[in-house]
Image (spheres, grey):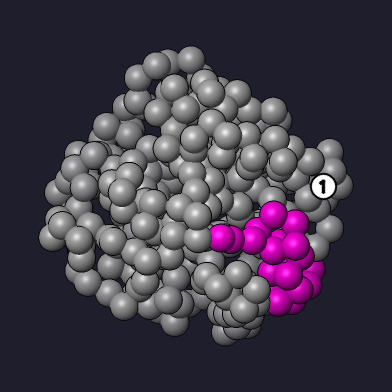
Amino acid sequence: MARDRKPSLTRASTNAGTDASTDTRTDTRLRTRPHIHPRARLAAAALAALTVGATTLALAETPATAAGAVAASPVKGHDVSSHQKNVNWPSAKAKGATFVYVKATESTTYRNPYFGQQYDGARKAGIIRGAYHFALPDRSSGGSQAAYFVAHGGDWKADGWTLPPALDIENNPYDKKHPCYGLSKTGMVNWIKAFSAEVKQETGRRPVIYTTALWWKTCTGNSAALASTHALWIARHESADAGSLPAGWPYWTFWQYDNSGSLPGDQNLFNGTVSQLRKFARGY
């Protein structure tokens, strides 16, 4: 049954802390199946039928603007955190990984202790990689968390191998009674704007926004204020398509369609070709 990710499917784990030995990612294991996950085949079929319109987003050569149609075979990738520990990157590359997002930081107190092996190892294996930050808006300001993120792995350069920084904003893993971290809808939108502004000032790129449609509706009031300037990384598991998107986004750039599969960590697709992914990474 198609649905937005429930708390049990999010990266957040209620028994996680913020020291160097813990992580808010749910644990996933590397599977040995050499073929693409069945849901990825469903996703490819759904994506081939998807129609998207032009936007003001600077998402490089998107399918909508470059080829007039969405790629029939979206690019396969994944995302990892400290739960995956030292990743076998040549194996991931052999299994079809073209890109990966690596968790760098959380709040202003946590750094992924495996970040170097994961981020640099992916690049050495010929995988396009980027870094993401897990937001805890009740701990500190958006600007301070963005600065911490950029200083500890969230920087960007236009080399064609580095994806723009990403903001992971979802249910509060430490207080289920306050999934929106105690912020009002307006307060949450302003927090994300502050995070984005700091990342843009320090790196030259706006962050990709990772979220679920349900959380975005609940905690931002389904705000469309960020859609015209930010790429969307939507999370929706156990479904043949990404479902209804948050307000203002006519299409997704990344789709996390499962939390386990043939690649280490969570399974993702990029909405385009490898050439388009590289242009997106370069920023044009």
Q: Which residue is mark 1?
A: 17
Compared to 243, does 222 lie above or below? below
Q: Decide: is 84 above or below 183.
A: above
Question: Image check: 231 left or right of 20?
Answer: left
Task: Determine the image quadrant of residue 282.
Answer: bottom left
> Where's residue 75, x and y in %?
33, 41
Q: Residue furthest front?
A: 159
Q: Nearer the viewer, residue 197 or 134?
A: 197
- Residue in the picture at 69% in, 63% down: 150
> Type of residue at label 1?
Gly
- Tell me where residue 211 appears, x and y as whole percent: 50, 59
Note whether residue 29 is visible: no
173 horizontally vs 52: left or right = right
Q: Is residue 153 above or below residue 117?
A: below
Residue range corresponding to the magenta coloring: 137-157
Residue 164 shows in the view:
yes
Residue 69 as seen in the image, left or right of residue 262:
left
Residue 249, horizontal then vertical, whole percent: 34, 69
Say which of 124 and 106 sits in front: 124
Of residues 235 and 73, which is closer to you in this image?
73
Q: Residue at x 60, y 23 (%)?
A: 88
> What's the residue at 23%, 57% (across, down)?
63
